Image: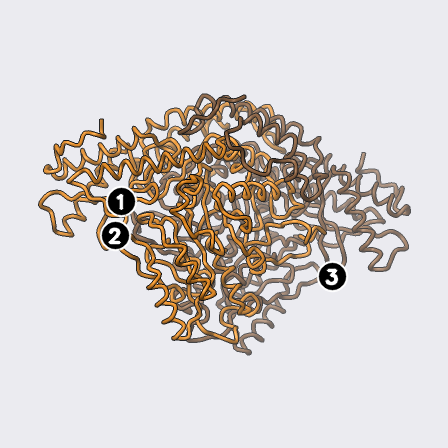
Chain colours: A orange, B brown
Amino acid sequence: MSDAPPVTGDMPVAEFRREAHRVVDWVADFLARLDGLPVTSAVQPGDVRAALPRTAPEGGEPIDAVLADLDRVIVPGMTHWSHPGFHAYFCSSSSGPGILGELLAAALNPNCMTWHACPAGTELEQLTLDWLRDLLGLPDPFSGVIYDGASASSFHALAAAREAAGLEIRERGMAGRADLTPLRVYASAEAHSSIEKAVVALGLGRAGYRTIPVDGAQRLRPDALVRAIAEDRGAGVTPMAVVATVGTTGTTAIDPVADIAEICRRERVWLHVDAAYGGSAAVVPERRDGLAGWDQADSIVVNPHKWLFVPLDLSVLFTRRPEVLRRAFALVPEYLRDGYEGRVENYMDYGLPLGRRFRALKLWLVLRYFGRAGLAARVREHLRLAAELAAWVDADPHFERVAPVPLSTVCFRLRPAGVTDAVALDDVNRRLLDAVNGTREVFLTHTRLDGRFVLRLVIGGIRTEQRHVERAWALLRQEATRLSPGAKGDGDGRAGS
Amino acid sequence: MSDAPPVTGDMPVAEFRREAHRVVDWVADFLARLDGLPVTSAVQPGDVRAALPRTAPEGGEPIDAVLADLDRVIVPGMTHWSHPGFHAYFCSSSSGPGILGELLAAALNPNCMTWHACPAGTELEQLTLDWLRDLLGLPDPFSGVIYDGASASSFHALAAAREAAGLEIRERGMAGRADLTPLRVYASAEAHSSIEKAVVALGLGRAGYRTIPVDGAQRLRPDALVRAIAEDRGAGVTPMAVVATVGTTGTTAIDPVADIAEICRRERVWLHVDAAYGGSAAVVPERRDGLAGWDQADSIVVNPHKWLFVPLDLSVLFTRRPEVLRRAFALVPEYLRDGYEGRVENYMDYGLPLGRRFRALKLWLVLRYFGRAGLAARVREHLRLAAELAAWVDADPHFERVAPVPLSTVCFRLRPAGVTDAVALDDVNRRLLDAVNGTREVFLTHTRLDGRFVLRLVIGGIRTEQRHVERAWALLRQEATRLSPGAKGDGDGRAGS
């Protein structure tokens, strides 16, 4: 039993020290055995709840009891996002320095809403975001602000675009404008659902969102964008923003941002770039060409919690027009006036959130511990592994790659000899996904491409090495062979050893 | 020097274990010396940045170097929100179990966006929010969802209210409705700025927000609300939501929620209760009467990161109408379809955020470590200390209390004998605030009440004991005496020993 907690005050420091050392050992042991754990859980809906008490304990319980339940219920009930076999969605892997950063942030626990409310919190956010901007090769005029996730970052970017439209929406509302022409936001048919959610939340409605067709490589077609804007203007619709994606969620396509930026300049429309996943590739200098034009955006979202090894959550919105973002959101009540207004940055002025935890700290630790070169090396290795996997897929007659691999995600499907029916092909691929995930050694997810069910394998976890990708490919080939015997023995022995 | 990080992979586990133990000792030492640190910083704008390198290091740096900079730059540059002398804004103090919860969450690092993406993450969120609901005495029909802060919780509540209005705004937008009658949200003149921010973000504009006058105790006047709604309806405005506050930020006034709920029922208007701070008082069963009627709301926000000793950030929105919230936000793209839809809760469907970190874990640790009785005892003690301070203020002829103390915040001002001019009174109180904060032993903030500058002293930090409140009061009296010698020697020796 741990000490009984006193009636007032925090856990005594001596107890905290002892318990924290114990928790650290638990965490280190967890990280050491992570590779050997199943990446996904075998629980069924309701199992986790059923294994835990239905009400909070009346008296206090020791930390020991919690650690026991972590081992008994939580860890076996989890999908392990930091596992080297995690290749689903987009990766979001924790790292040692990131974990230590969160520990420190929780202990220091300031609210970084205004400079005065925590000077070091505000200034470290400014500093680390300038570091990150430089690391990504973005120019000086961009300044950053941290939100929890990309959904929030894009929401705030589009709110700024709405403000930039100069229609007095902040004062009069969407429906109170003198000029009630509908506003519209454009993004490719492959853009992330958070964009449409933001458009709906901001009061434009789903009708205020228009998707633009993509080319054969799932990239927004600039000609179609030009036509859509012209058509809408002709119908009395005002284009409010275009969202270009650098790394779509389906196939990680990179929209032709330079062309789109040119259109936006001409049309005087806000350009927001969703580089939540793909932006991290810019830490590899020789890969920046792939993102050409993104630096011409009005705003860009990049998520260090996706592919820069910072634990959830930390998303960054960079913008060249912070004053517009500020105009959209600043609203300072008396109890927050502190005499520093105008002399300092008060991050609360740049968005909805007032309570702002010290997220910059973990980014600072990650940037310092790995350094610029260390981060570049890791992302570069992921890009290399993805190219290698793509080559294996290409070399295997039973698989087909269904999209280019501009980043670290490979999209492919099984094409067993003789199976040509679309429904049958979808079915065998769905069964392949289930079979491979059923091993619980790896976790992949799927998407649909031109109606076809396709598998995605994302490489972005900090613990993922060549051998993990080889193992994933071996499992895919092994399960493919079971599902369609014709896929056996194709003689490609490069992977799966 | 620490080990040089390898070119790929995470910090090696052995190094993590060693560094994490070192960081834990740093944190424990920090917590042990917190009481003796200045609560605020002496830095001037720019000092923190100037003390740190302008770009990220090229090669990696050891964690040691970061700890050295924490001691040299960050800690001295901070406002210490967990300090026992922190009485500003609303408190937000970290606790031992909360810190351990964050450490574990950062190590496990799942994204709790769907059940399948982390079953234990989703189910522990459901479980802990049910525990919390019971702890607060709220009835079963309420179910909860975690957001980062109260601003987000209230934003989502009002988005649900907009959806509940049945105007097809999700599809057609605010300005695309067949019926363009303006929508309006009502809250007291003392409501939090986040409410107006949410109204603006949702596209109602500041014109869509109407403040209702308060009574002498800063509580929303139901008669004035009834009149405003009638007047607006007469002018073709549709009331969309009323926000009642349980613990306003200025003086912690509690609106007459039962009366307001009755009006909302009659008028068929969504009632949202902002109990971000005050709701925590409901963990003290004998104090629930003070919140009477809040359980009749459509939605309620309570922030465990304010007064339930959970580190930033963790805000909970409870609602009786989760299906409306879901209708406002659910939008499921193919790459997130996993076959579990309809059988499980996917929290991503209840809001903008898709990336959702494992916040429930720290709440679970805090609820288990302190237990129901332990949390009640701590909040009860804060309520007692505030009542005691209020009595000291009342007994001192040189001070006046300017608002009731329904919770744990005391609002007061100095009234030196002979000073009656409003400007002079404001001035002496501003100087008193500066002088007391200038000691850096305590940190208080101010508000304005009927135009008067008044001081607020909030008691809500987990480390704040009787002696800290006594010391704060002694400092106030001491500085008051310096500023207006007449305030000296009033013979009340109960505090300030």
Give the residue at mark 3.
B450
Same chain for marks 1 and 2?
A: yes
Give the residue at mark 2.
A449
Lateral position of residue A497 relative to residue B265, left or right: left
> Which class describes the residues within 10 Å of circle 3: few (<14), some (14-19), or many (20+)?
few
Q: Nearer the viewer, residue B5 or A487?
A: B5
Q: Give above or below for B383 relative to B12.
A: below
Lateral position of residue A471 relative to residue A22, left or right: left
Lateral position of residue A449 relative to residue A483, left or right: right
Secondary element type, mark 3: loop
Residue B323 visible from this viewpoint: no
Q: Name the disc covering residue A411, or none.
A: 1
> Which class describes the residues within 10 Å of circle 1: few (<14), some (14-19), or many (20+)?
many
Q: Name the disc covering residue A333, or none.
A: none
Q: Give above or below for B30 relative to A182.
A: above
Residue B39 visible from this viewpoint: yes
Secondary element type, mark 2: strand
For residue A459, what is the image quadrant? top left
Secondary element type, mark 1: strand
For residue A10, what is the image quadrant? top right
Q: Position of residue B424 (x, y in %)?
A: 85, 56
Q: Nearer the viewer, residue B331 or B495?
A: B331
Q: Nearer the viewer, mark 2 or mark 3?
A: 2
On what subunit does the disc labeled 1 rest? A
On what subunit does the disc labeled 3 rest? B
Measured in 3D between alpha carbons, the distance from the residue under mark 2 to the one under mark 3, in whole angstroms, is 62 Å
Amino acid type, callout 2: Leu
What residue lies at 34% left-to-right and 54% top-to-bottom?
A: B332
Amino acid type, callout 1: Cys
